[in-house]
Image (cartoon, grey):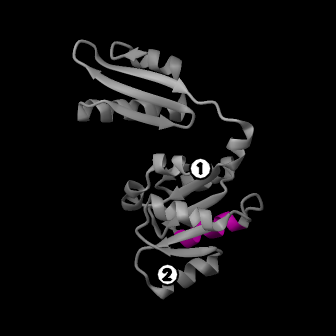
Amino acid sequence: ALTQSDDKKTLAEFFSGEERVHVENALARALISGRRTSDSYGSLSLEIDPVRSVGWVVRLSRETRSVESERRRKSVLAIVGALDAQRLDEHDAERSGLDLTVVGVGGVGLELALRRKPDFVLVGTHLPDGSASDFVEAMRSDPRLAGVPIAVVSTSGQNLEEARARRSGADRVVPGPIDSRALIDLVASRF
């Protein structure tokens, strides 16, 4: 168990990278709510208890998964704006067998796609560093990513937007905003 007296250096000894950021965010949510919170990230399960004398206590456990169960999990990369990002719950996705990563910038998304080669990509129409069509064309031009299914979230419902996404190589255009349930169903329809 970790307590509030454990500083960031100690936290860094237990966790690294994205896992540490996730634990810190979970702690912040628990402290703000003042209630017992359960959370998970990958194979890590957290139970966070606010305790008056200590501040908080975190109980950790790691789930071990068989190679077969890991193989069934689908990796999904979502490059979407703030509204869709708020509606995509990584925990709902994980419970449905998806490893969901959500980012808000196309350049970061492309870098992650090259590194991780996701099973499915969801991209919002309006990105701060370009359009969905630009992102899709960049993915399709790279032989390592050319076969990854891509769905574009259309927020305007305009035929022009849909036609542009399809010309750039998107497999599907879906109406937005999109939430976790719609994403889970969308990915399930591809496999």
Residue at (39%, 33%) from the top-left corner? 38
| Location of mark 2 (residue) | 161
Q: CA distance from mark 1 to mark 2?
A: 31 Å
Q: Nearer the viewer, residue 19 or 126?
A: 19
Question: Residue 36 in magenta?
Answer: no
Q: Is residue 135 magenta?
A: yes
Q: Amino acid at mark 2?
A: Glu
Q: Looking at the rendering, which quadrant does residue 152 occupy?
A: bottom right
Question: Where does the C terminus fall, quadrant-wise?
Answer: bottom right
Above or below, comparing residue 26 to residue 3 in the picture: below
Q: Nearer the viewer, residue 34 or 76?
A: 34
Closest to the camera, between mark 1 and mark 2, is: 1
Residue 1 location (% of width, % of height): 43, 15
Q: Position of residue 149 (x, y in %)?
A: 66, 66
Span shown in magenta: 132-140
Mark 1, other Cα within 10 Å: few <14 / some 14–19 / many ≥20: some
Front residue of 107/181: it is 181
The residue tagged 1 is 97
Label ID, residue 142: none
**Considering the numbered disc 2 on the image, is that residue within a helix, a strand or a loop?**
helix
The three-letter code of the residue at mark 1 reads: Gly
Left or right relative to 129: residue 177: left
Residue shown at 35% from the left, 29% from the top: 27
Within 10 Å of disc 2 (Cα), the crowding (few <14, some 14-19, many 20+) is: some
Would you say 153 lies left or right of 69 here?
left
Residue at 65% x, 75% y: name it.
169
